[in-house]
Image (tube, rainbow, N blue to C red):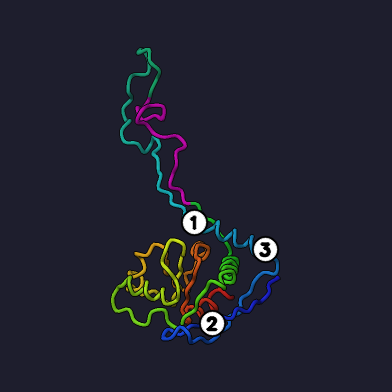
């Protein structure tokens, strides 16, 4: 059974941080907390499995170069018979049951993933700051401007804070300005993911991005 929960955000003016007005967002959650944890765990597991890098790739005896000629004749040498010097028991031969670049995909239903994201949005409510416009104009990349803007909202880019910035649409200059900050991550509102929301200790969202989140993940 789903229940509806109302979240009322204080939207801070980009000109004066003391000026605030309220906007509400209604999200659907499961009634029991145990169901919420289960759905969140499934969504996290799915993302971790699908993002797991698989670079190791060993070669079997058919893929190793060489081995076309029989090393010695079948009989009369006193040695064990051999058909190829690329046999797995030979040095330089193929590998038996080695790692391969097989891609394993874990599936989760769309509504389950949306529910998991709504659960995290609700859990991070107290640590979320909503602004009318995070950056008014950014004509060129500037990490200093981002740091000063975050300080305006009492957010320090130190090791203690993992700051997640959610905007309606990522601009290239904004991306270049934030990529050099280790503890700052930039996401667009329609590309939220479980790991980024879990890691974030502080979240700052554009007003337009909040509306996109409400429309995209509240089906």
In this view, the residue in front, 152 or 182, is 152
- Label 1 environment density (alpha carbons within 10 Å; few <14, some 14–19, many ≥20): few
Label 2: which secondary element: strand
Provide the residue designation for mark 3: 35
What residue is pinned by disc 1? 50
Q: Is residue 99 above or below residue 8?
A: above
Q: Quadrant of residue 71?
A: top left
Give how far across and how far down residue 218 sits, in percent. Answer: 58, 75
- The disc, 1 or 2, on the residue closer to the chain's N-terminal end is 2
Residue lying at 33% horizontally and 20% vertically, measured from the top left: 72
**In the image: residue 81, left or right of residue 46:** left
Highlighted range, magenta: 83-103
Of the two numbered discs 1 and 2 in the rendering, the one whose residue sits closer to the viewer: 2
Q: Is residue 61 magenta?
A: no
Q: Is residue 97 above or below residue 193?
A: above
Q: State how far apart marks 3 and 1 are (Cα).
A: 23 Å
| Residue at which label 2 appears | 10
Residue 86 is one of the magenta-drawn residues: yes
How far is the residue under mark 3 from the one under mark 2?
A: 29 Å
């Amino acid at each position: 059974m789903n229940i509806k929960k109302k979240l009322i955000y204080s939207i801070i003016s980009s000109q004066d941080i003391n000026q605030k007005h309220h906007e509400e967002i209604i999200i659907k959650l499961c009634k029991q907390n145990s169901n919420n944890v289960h759905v969140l765990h499934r969504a996290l597991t799915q993302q971790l499995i699908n993002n797991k890098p698989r670079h190791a790739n060993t070669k079997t005896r058919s893929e190793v170069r060489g081995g076309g000629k029989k090393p010695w004749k079948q009989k009369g040498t006193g040695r064990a018979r051999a058909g190829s010097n690329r046999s797995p028991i030979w040095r330089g031969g193929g590998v038996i049951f080695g790692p391969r670049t097989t891609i394993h995909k874990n599936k989760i239903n769309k509504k389950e993933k949306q529910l998991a994201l709504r659960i995290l949005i609700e859990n991070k409510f107290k640590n979320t700051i909503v602004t009318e416009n995070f950056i008014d104009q950014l004509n060129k990349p500037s990490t200093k401007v981002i740091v000063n803007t975050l300080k305006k909202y009492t957010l320090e880019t130190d090791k203690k804070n993992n700051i997640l910035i959610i905007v309606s649409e990522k601009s290239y200059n904004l991306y270049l300005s934030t990529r050099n900050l280790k503890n700052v991550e930039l996401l667009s509102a329609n590309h939220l993911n479980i790991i980024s929301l879990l890691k974030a200790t502080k979240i700052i969202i554009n007003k337009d991005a909040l509306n996109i989140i409400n429309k995209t993940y509240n089906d």
